[in-house]
Amino acid sequence: MRTLSPIVAVLLASSCATSGSGGSTATATIDVHVAASETTGAAETASADAPVSTDAASPEIAAAADTTRAPEDAAPPEPCAQQVGKVLCNLEGQGYIRDETTGLATEAPYLPSFVLAEAIAKTTQKYAIVMLGAWWCGKCRAATGLVVSKLGQYGKKAAFINLLVEGDTPSKPATKSNLQTWASQLKVPFTIGCDMPDTPFALKKELGPRETAYILERATMKVLYKGPNVASALKELDGLPE
């Protein structure tokens, strides 16, 4: 499952690639050092097999060698984790991205692959609530129905993302067809998604069991709250500043 940096970080990631950079960095360092040696006339005395270091180079050459280095005051990427105070990992799924309070999620184009950062990037609210569910789960249907009925109250404060982590039965992952039926029956207007076909139950494994709900700071995907169901998340949302 792919994870990228958070959006605004965001991802907002992480999700959460730098292989092969060692060789190119070493080559760049050697090239710079050779240029310094030619400039100072030290090329005749330098051993071709001797290790090269930028320590002896002039300040200008050393600065040139450091052009690919991050500023010392730049914060390192924040590790992602599914817990309060951390940036939620930028997990991948399939489905429909939409930030509306009317209509159906399926009015948006179907995306065979998207990450959470993409869904959140299309929203403008201060918060985002990621809620898990299962197609077969009656409590999950009721929870989603509750959110749909309260969009007039909460829709301006938080965006909602509904992820199905199980399908027709607890042993089956959700599918595109399940998402379409879910949206149609429950009149879901906001983003809905489920696992990628090649990674069944990955969302469940990473985010938790059905009915789990997260409140995120939309701009950073930082977890502000993690609870057992969306009803508890809505109560928590009431106490958060506008």
Image (tube, rainbow, N blue to C red):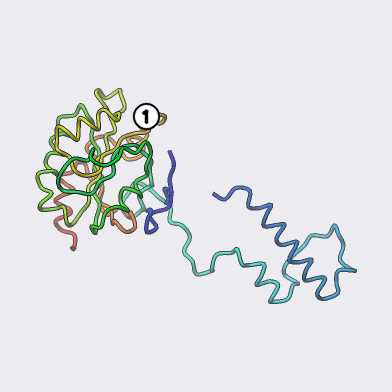
In the image: residue 240, left or right of residue 77: left
Residue 156 position within the rendered picture, expressed as x and y whole percent measured from the top left: 17, 56
Q: Residues within 10 Å of mark 1 (few under 14, many from 20)?
A: some
Q: Is residue 209 above or below residue 234?
A: above
> Which residue is located at x 42 percent, y 50 percent?
14
Which sits in the foreground, 65 or 122? 122
Residue 104 appears in which quarter of the rendering?
A: top left
> Which residue is located at x 82 percent, y 76 percent?
40
Amino acid type shown at disc 1 = Pro
In the image: residue 63, left or right of residue 47: left
Farthest residue to the right: give it.
44
Residue 140 appears in which quarter of the rendering?
A: top left
Residue 192 position within the rendered picture, expressed as x and y whole percent measured from the top left: 26, 39
Residue designated by label 1? 200
Quadrant in the picture for the N terminus: top left
> Which residue is located at x 26 percent, y 25 percent?
170
Q: Is residue 206 above or below residue 170?
A: below
In the image: residue 10, left or right of residue 174: right
Q: Secondary structure at mark 1?
A: loop
Residue 196 position within the rendered picture, expressed as x and y whole percent measured from the top left: 37, 33
> Which residue is located at x 73 percent, y 76 percent?
58
Residue 232 position within the rendered picture, expressed as x and y whole percent measured from the top left: 16, 46
Quadrant in the picture for the C terminus: bottom left
The image shows a total of numbered marks equal to 1
